[in-house]
Image (cartoon, grey):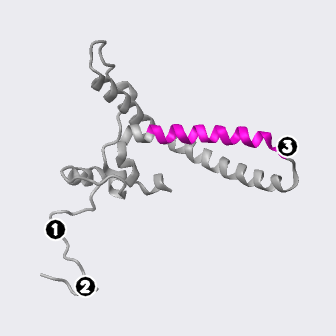
């Protein structure tokens, strides 16, 4: 049965209240959520804590060590402080680029030696970020619009 535009949707009497976050998560448990979508970011399983990790044994294979390393990367990348620090680095880098551009109009190249050092530092920070994200999520990270930005 189709509803006309602007008509009210029938109220389901079995659900007397809006669903909580946990109830919605339970409903979505069996549905595969595509990486990078808003639903995935809200309801996907969050990385565990570092204290939950089990260190691989000495005789464990390379795969066990790789899984351990990727789980550490998932924990780091999934932490709110990581996002905050990367956002701060992006903002500071933007300001530095503006200051460097303005100073390059009136100052000599020798006066801008600090800009080259700052550029290398920011390049190192963003390279580590990309490597951590790629290790944590694999090539699926390319589907994330913010990552591509």
Q: Identify the magenta region.
A: 109-132
Query: Mark 3 or 1 closer to N-term?
Result: 1
Residue at which label 1 appears: 13
Residue 118 higher or lower than 26, as above or below: above
Residue 117 falls inside the magenta stretch: yes
Query: Mark 1 or 2 closer to N-term?
Result: 2
Left or right of 76, for residue 61: left
Left or right of 15, for residue 115: right
Left or right of 55, for residue 132: right
Residue at which label 2 appears: 7
Disc 3 element = helix
Q: Quadrant of the N terminus?
A: bottom left
State which mark lies toward you, 1 or 2.
Answer: 2
- Residue beneath the point at 40% across and 30% down: 72
Residue at which label 3 appears: 111
Q: Are marks 1 and 2 in contact (CB under 8 Å)?
A: no
State which mark lies toward you, 2 or 3.
Answer: 3
Disc 1 element = loop
Q: How many marks?
A: 3
Local crowd at mark 1 within 10 Å, few (<14), some, or many (≥20)? few
Give residue 61's position: percent from left, percent from top: 27, 20
State which mark lies toward you, 3 or 1.
Answer: 3
Give residue 80's position: percent from left, percent from top: 48, 42
């Amino acid at each position: 049965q189709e509803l006309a535009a602007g008509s009210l949707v029938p109220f389901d009497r079995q659900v007397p209240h809006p669903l909580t976050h946990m109830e919605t998560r339970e409903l979505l448990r069996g549905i595969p959520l595509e990486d990078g979508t808003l639903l995935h970011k809200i309801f996907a399983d969050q990385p565990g804590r570092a204290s939950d990790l089990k260190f691989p044994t000495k005789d464990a294979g390379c795969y066990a060590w790789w899984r351990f390393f990727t789980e550490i990367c998932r924990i780091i990348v999934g932490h709110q402080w990581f996002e905050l620090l990367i956002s701060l680095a992006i903002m500071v880098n933007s300001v530095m680029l503006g200051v460097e551009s303005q100073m390059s109009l009136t100052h000599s190249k020798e006066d801008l030696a600090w800009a080259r050092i700052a550029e290398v530092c920011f390049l190192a920070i963003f390279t580590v970020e990309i490597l951590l994200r790629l290790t944590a999520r694999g090539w699926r990270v390319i589907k994330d619009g913010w990552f591509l930005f």
